[in-house]
């Protein structure tokens, strides 16, 4: 399956990553690494396994695609201090991934401060007529963003199914959240109002191991 956006072809992956084969780049949004450890520091004790599982998912996508560059579109860490709370095993895995390829960390609202983990920390990245950034906006053509954790909900065989999704029109694409501990927001919710030209909208819904194009007519709220 392919997504054509702003004159370029992309391959969405069932993990939530987006592979730009022509540039050999892998795009991921909203990893929210160290989310559970952040909750634990605030007294909500949850198993701190999310970072390792997310990095394992990313490791597999890099193996499958052979991407030479990774661009993380912000909120890579759930809090800025998450860069210092990585367990030794997770830090070693992340270091190993960054040794394989060029790595760009774009700042997000959860992790606005540049860090010293490796790679480059940037507020945004422009390349071949596209702008990659964290928060979506309507005023820029060819923008790829994350932040909103988009999900599509459809009715199938009398049941409702809700999954993360890629959603775009001719000007803006919003990627699903990649982290294993992230929630989702229905693309029919008020947060998405005004971002897309709904007559042009295209939705690619994530399933178990595969992706599904979804007609906007089948979308339901909730």
Image (cartoon, rainbow, N blue to C red):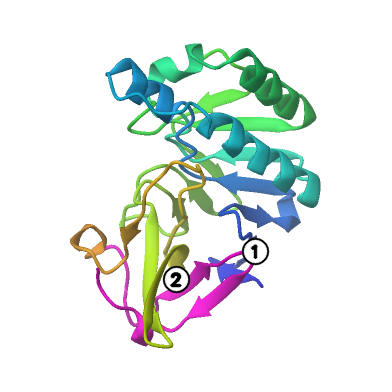
**Span colored in magenta:** 195-222
Residue hosting label 2: 170
The answer to which of marks 2 and 1 sits earlier in the sequence is: 2
Horizontal placement of 169 versus 72: left or right?
left
Can you tell which of label 2 and label 1 is closer to the viewer? 1
Residue 135 location (% of width, % of height) = 35, 45
Q: Residue at x 46, y 37 (%)?
A: 124
- Where does residue 181 sit, x and y in percent of width and height? 44, 41
Q: Is residue 112 visible?
A: no
Total numbered labels placed on residues in the image: 2
Residue sitting at the far left: 190
Q: Residues within 10 Å of mark 2 (few under 14, many from 20)?
A: some
Q: Residue at x 60, y 30 (%)?
A: 52
Q: Is residue 142 above or below residue 38?
A: below
Q: Which mark is residue 167?
A: none
Q: Is residue 84 left or right of residue 42?
A: right
Q: Quadrant of residue 222?
A: bottom left
CA distance for labels 2 and 1? 27 Å
Residue 216 sits inside the magenta stretch? yes
Q: Look at 65% across and 31% down and name the residue there.
A: 103
Which label belongs to residue 209? Answer: 1
């Amino acid at each position: 399956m392919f997504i054509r956006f702003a004159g370029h072809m992309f391959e969405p992956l069932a993990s939530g990553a987006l592979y730009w084969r022509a540039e050999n780049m892998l795009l991921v949004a909203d990893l929210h690494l160290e989310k559970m450890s952040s909750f634990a520091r605030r007294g909500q004790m949850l198993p701190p396994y999310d970072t390792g599982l997310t990095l394992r998912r990313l490791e597999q996508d890099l193996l499958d695609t052979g991407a030479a560059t990774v661009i993380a579109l912000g909120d890579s860490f759930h809090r800025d201090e998450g860069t210092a709370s990585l367990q030794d095993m997770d830090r070693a895995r992340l270091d190993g991934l960054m040794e394989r390829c060029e790595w760009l960390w774009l700042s997000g609202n959860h992790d606005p401060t540049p860090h010293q983990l490796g790679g480059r920390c940037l507020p945004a990245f422009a390349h071949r007529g596209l702008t990659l950034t964290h928060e979506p906006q309507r005023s820029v053509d060819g923008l790829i963003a994350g932040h909103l954790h988009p999900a599509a909900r459809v009715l199938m065989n009398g049941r409702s199914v809700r999954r993360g999704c890629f959603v775009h029109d001719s000007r803006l694409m919003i990627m699903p959240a990649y982290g294993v501990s992230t929630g989702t927001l229905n693309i029919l919710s008020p947060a998405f109002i005004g971002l897309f030209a709904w007559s042009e909208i295209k939705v690619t819904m994530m399933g178990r191991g595969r992706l599904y194009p979804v007609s906007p007519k089948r979308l339901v709220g909730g």
